[in-house]
Image: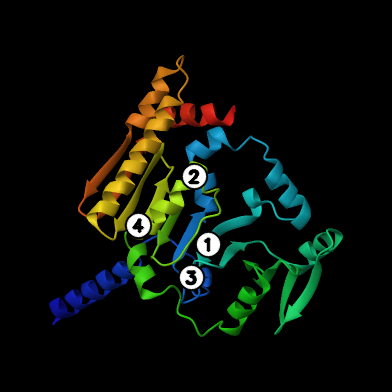
Amino acid sequence: MRIFWALTILAVSTACAHKTEGPKIDSSLDTLVPPDTVLMAGTRLEALLKTPVYQRNFANRQFPQIDEFAQRTGLDPRKDLWELLFASNGHNGILFGRGKFGDEMMQPKFEKQGMQSFGYKGYTMLGDDRGALLLISPTTAAAGEIPQLQSIIDHRGATNGPPAAMVALLKEIPPEAQFWGAYGGGSIHLPFDERSLLGNLNKMLATIQTGTLYFDLRSGVSGVASAVCANNDGAEQVAGALKALVGIGRLSVPKNQPDLAQVYDSIRITHEGTQVKLHIDVPEMMADKFLGMWLRQ
């Protein structure tokens, strides 16, 4: 009988562990994700800021955009935000955040910027007609357009988090990833100029049914981007476009820094049937040189 109960406990523990597969998402954010979500992206800021790559390359740098955001809101993303989660149905998106939020700290600074404070069903929003920040709790907030934020309030407590198809995709992402994304298919358009190089990403997305992406910066830069296309021809096109982008990047390396070309040698693209994967594994010191090259521009 003891053996029976021991096996039962082991089975339950294994089942619970299986449920935690995928990236770490705070439960207070996960349950707010709308059921029509087709695109999710998240970052664990606390974990990211502690990585050696961040500490050496970004910790002591000044970013005007971040400084301006901190001045306007009273929030410094480097100190006061713990986690960010973006969810989109392909047309409208909401950015959720966990951090140190509070009416008394943020409201006066928003009002100085010409923004207003208004309520909806007992919750406070700070913003204007174009968009607002919804204060859900002292540690949870959401930013987006007013109708989407009102919908979050209307359905709070009635949603169970991401749809099943998205949950299945998230299981492909390791929990230690500091930055990740998942695309469940459907209509989506990135805001890039179609005539630009990045505009080709929208053409690639049109052939992709589902995809995931994650990065781990604990030791260098490692990660995998995976896409499942509608057919083999589409997969070949995506693989070809990725190889072209990597080739262009390799050509951009200064001739007096040939060692940086090794960064692009660490990027590997595989194509099997309708699935295409991009693998990146840049060693720690090489990652510093690569980031240094771009940060000096």
Residue highlighted by disc 3:
30
Which circle's residue, 2 or 4, is located before the other in the chain?
2
Residue displayed at 55% across by 59% down? 84
Mark 1 to mark 3 CA distance (whole Å): 9 Å
Residue highlighted by disc 1:
85
Label 4 sits on what residue type?
Thr
**Residue toward you, 245 or 220:** 245
Residue displayed at 75% across by 79% down? 119
Residue displayed at 50% across by 54% down? 43
Q: Residues within 10 Å of mark 1 (few under 14, many from 20)?
A: many
Residue contact between numbered discs 2 and 3, judged by CB atoms under 8 Å: no
Label 2 sits on what residue type?
Leu
Label 1 sits on what residue type?
Leu
Mark 2 to mark 4 CA distance (whole Å): 16 Å
Which mark, by number, is residue 228? none
Where does the image place residue 153, in percent across and percent down from the top left? 62, 80
Q: Is residue 146 left or right of residue 84?
A: right
Residue contact between numbered discs 1 and 4, judged by CB atoms under 8 Å: no
Residue displayed at 38% across by 30% down? 263
Which mark, by number, is residue 207? 4
Label 3 sits on what residue type?
Asp
- What secondary structure is marked by label 3? helix
Where does the image place residue 183, in percent across and percent down from the top left? 40, 61
Q: Residues within 10 Å of mark 4 (few under 14, many from 20)?
A: some
Residue contact between numbered discs 1 and 3, judged by CB atoms under 8 Å: yes
Mark nearest the camera among 1 and 4 is: 4
